[in-house]
Image (cartoon, grey):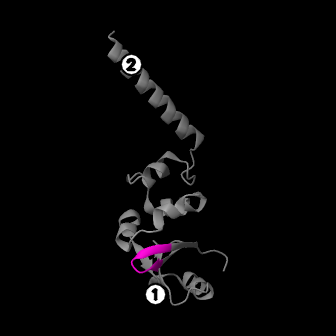
Amino acid sequence: MPRSTMLILIVLGFFTVFLVGWVMLYPSQDDPKNIQYVLWKTGLPTMDADRAAGTMIGDVDREKMILGKTREQLRSRFGYLTPLAQASPYLQNCYLSSGRTGQDVLFVRRGPWMVVFHGDRASELVLIKGC
């Protein structure tokens, strides 16, 4: 067997073992280290956007996906953003009690993530819970 073929097989074997190990270590779809979520963060459509938005709760780097982005960039990533007027009564009440009234906000899909905008860019990401 030629050396180049042997090298290719070794690399493919290592890559396969690496991927299988990763999938086995982080099998839960709600884990931010799950391969589907990690690939989704890079822009690949590997995960449902609602599930990905929920998985963001455990992601320590979630702000990097949001802050500094335009509304269009966020819509492209999440599919849609919900305006305050169309958010659930719970989210509207939380907004009112958050001290951010008068600020330009949108919610990531129908979930608990509120994005505050300054101008045309996201400036803050707020998890709405227990208000």
Check disc 2 and report the residue beneath it: 7
Q: Which residue is painted at 55% across and 85% down in the image? A: 92
97 shown above or below 43? below
Q: Which residues are magenta?
A: 117-123
Furthest residue in direction top, as rendered: 1
Residue 52 x, y percent position in the rendering: 49, 59
Residue 1 falls in image quadrant: top left
Question: Quick one: 91 or 6, which is closer to the camera?
Answer: 6
Please name which of the two marks, 1 or 2, marks the residue nearer to the observer.
2
Question: Quick one: 118 or 27, which is closer to the camera?
Answer: 118
Residue 61 x, y percent position in the rendering: 55, 58
Q: Which residue is painted at 45% across and 84% down in the image? A: 86
Residue 76 x, y percent position in the rendering: 35, 65
Question: Quick one: 3 or 129, which is closer to the camera?
Answer: 3
Furthest residue in direction right, as rendered: 130
Q: Is residue 97 left or right of residue 87?
A: right
Check disc 1 and report the residue beneath it: 85
Instruction: Report crowding for label 1: few under 14, some 14 to 19, many 20 or more residues within 10 A (C-alpha).
Output: few
Q: Is residue 5 left or right of residue 117?
A: left
